[in-house]
Image (cartoon, grey):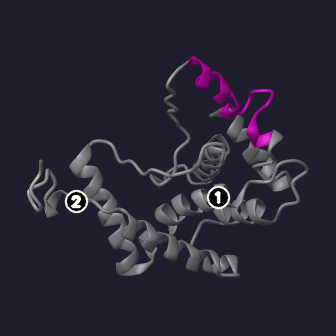
Amino acid sequence: MFKLGKGLSTEEQQYDPTSIINAIRYQVDQWRSRPNPADWQVTPETARLLQHWRHHRFSQIRPFFCQIEAVETIIWLSEVAPKSGKSAKSFLEHLVNANNDANPELMRVALKLATGAGKTTVMAMLIAWQTINAVRRPTSSNFTRGFLVVTPGLTIRDRLRVLLPNDPDSYYQSRELVPGDRGWKRLQMCLMLW
């Protein structure tokens, strides 16, 4: 039996991610509530995608709020927080320190979504956001056109083929995740090439 105060964990070993998660959620909520896209502190391409995901009249399945919220969180951490002052930068420092403690060679950020919440759609939205921005900003190190998707087996790998832009059931087209207006047709083609 463990004596009170003599358990396996010490104060230094205690990890409570709830406070930082709630603080980031609060910041993202405040940012999301800004009505003017010019105040969002994101690239014009990101602003266009956010407007599309939030307001487009989808012919079939529109992204769920939790999917948009997950993508917005990554966008806020990537594009907004670095430009938003000391408190926002403290979140980034926390993430860097946590990653350095776990595996300094690989920066990771996790999103929590329930079973059936549409993680594949979130992955497609993140790939579209990164690719479109990378094409428009080829010298930027903030965006990429290369993606590695690791799966636990062949069945899941086969289900994720919808992330391939040239797949007949590609989510970018079938779920209308990339705006279809004229100016975006070229960027849709760039998605086909990654």
For this view, does 103 lie left or right of residue 183?
left
Q: Main secondary structure of the magenta part?
A: helix
Q: Is residue 104 visible?
A: no
Say which quadrant the C terminus sits in: top right
Name above or below for residue 15 compared with residue 40: above
Separation of residues labelled 1 and 2 (CA atoms): 28 Å
Residue at point 80% right, 44% down?
A: 175
Q: Residue furthest right?
A: 59
Q: Secondary structure at mark 2?
A: loop
For this view, does 187 lie left or right of residue 79?
right
Residue 16, image x and y in percent?
Answer: 31, 63
Which segment did they paint magenta?
A: 154-173
Q: Are marks 1 and 2 in contact (CB under 8 Å)?
A: no
Where residue 11 sits, quadrant-wise, is: bottom left
Where residue 106 sits, quadrant-wise, is: top left
Q: Is residue 166 magenta?
A: yes
- Tag in front: 1 or 2: 2
Q: Disc 2 designates what residue? A: 14
Q: Secondary structure at mark 1?
A: helix
Q: Disc 1 designates what residue? A: 66
For this view, does 153 lie left or right of residue 47?
left
Q: Is residue 13 magenta?
A: no
> Which comes sooner in the sequence, label 1 or label 2?
2
Name above or below for residue 156 compared with residue 186: above
